[in-house]
Image (cartoon, grey):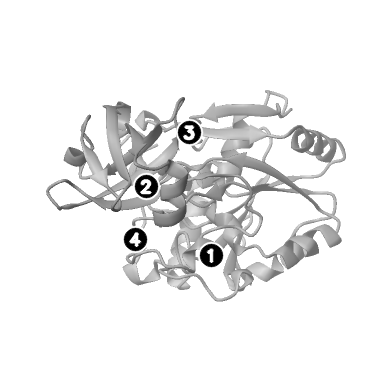
Amino acid sequence: MRTADFDYHLPPELIAQQPLAERTASRLLVVRPDPAAFEDRRFSDLPSLIPPGDLLVLNTTRVRPARLLGTRPGGGPAEVLLIHPSTDDSWVAMGKPGSALRPGKRIRLDQRIEVETIEILDEGYRRVRFVGGTAEEALERLGRMPLPPYINREAESADRERYQTVYAEREGSVAAPTAGLHFSERLLHQVEQRGAGVARLDLEVGPGTFRPVEAEDPTAHPMHPERFEIPEALAASIAATRKAGGRIWAVGTTVVRALESAAEADGTVRPGRADTRMLILPGYQFRVVNHLITNFHLPRSTLVMLVAALAGTERVMAAYRHAVAARYRFYSYGDAMLVLGR
């Protein structure tokens, strides 16, 4: 297995720069385990595809407006991306340029609030503190939604709503669980009306989700830790669904990683909080998840590899070629894919 096995050609014009006016109007590519032709559907068809008795699991994390723009003492531009609070009144952050985030240096956000770097951490992270105001104040007044680097525009006011799922709860992520962006409250209600269950967990999506795999051997790729929490109610719902013969549907790769990280060998899911560095590659034996709803991901990424682990590398890469030929919209604001496991 090589990283190059998960590469594909994507015309730049297929990278979605704006969301559709209606969340559920996205296209949905259905990928079944048999070699039959792929099905081109609409996301609004999803409730009819989920059998009664199955369980749909959502990631309810809320994206923090974590991108802060400022200036260096000499007047040059700089920016800080807040990742998560540290153990005291400081934060773990990233930023650019790196020279502006050396210990003791400050970035001015406005006439009063500055960000000072306290220390350099591993893998490019910094520990920073706020001077002249609080982090909460800076985020509320000055924070911008941290749109992915492949969206070639500045965040707009509309992104505060659209780069967020309709069921988002606790703030903590620097990227949206994008498979969930296609859902409306009405569509979720339709899923439940047809007899399927809907349950929730929380995984804080970190910047590592956009980190390319540079090693030719994907097993050498370092995964950044991401925090997750499995409620006791979710663990109980999964156990009851599996006992009754139902299947588990993950909405997004973040849900897959949280559930599989919390799973015992027999598929029992442990409730509670933990961190995950799980890298799921082809050959992995899934313990909990049967089906996956996901967006289209970057070439050579750990996310494409995870999808291939569920459906097979050849099948998934053929699906991506089909999506390119059929002019699907790609990445965070793009269309979706339903991968039905074996």
Residue type marked 2: Arg
In front: mark 3 or mark 1? 1
The x and y percentages for residue 214 are 29, 39
Task: Give the side of residue 106 with respect to residue 300, left or right.
Answer: left
Marks 2/4: CA–CA distance: 11 Å
Disc 3 crowd, CA 10 A, few/some/many (<14, 14-19, 20+): some
Marks 3/1: CA–CA distance: 28 Å
Residue type marked 1: Arg
Label 4 element class: loop
Residue 300, numbered circle: 2
25 up-or-down from 164: above or below? below
Residue that carries the numbered disc 1 in the rendered image: 162
The x and y percentages for residue 176 are 51, 52
Residue that carries the numbered disc 4 in the rendered image: 9
Marks 1/2: CA–CA distance: 27 Å
Residue type marked 3: Leu
In front: mark 3 or mark 4? 3
Residue type marked 4: His
Marks 1/4: CA–CA distance: 27 Å
Task: Give the side of residue 170 with respect to residue 297, left or right.
Answer: right
194 up-or-down from 58: above or below? below
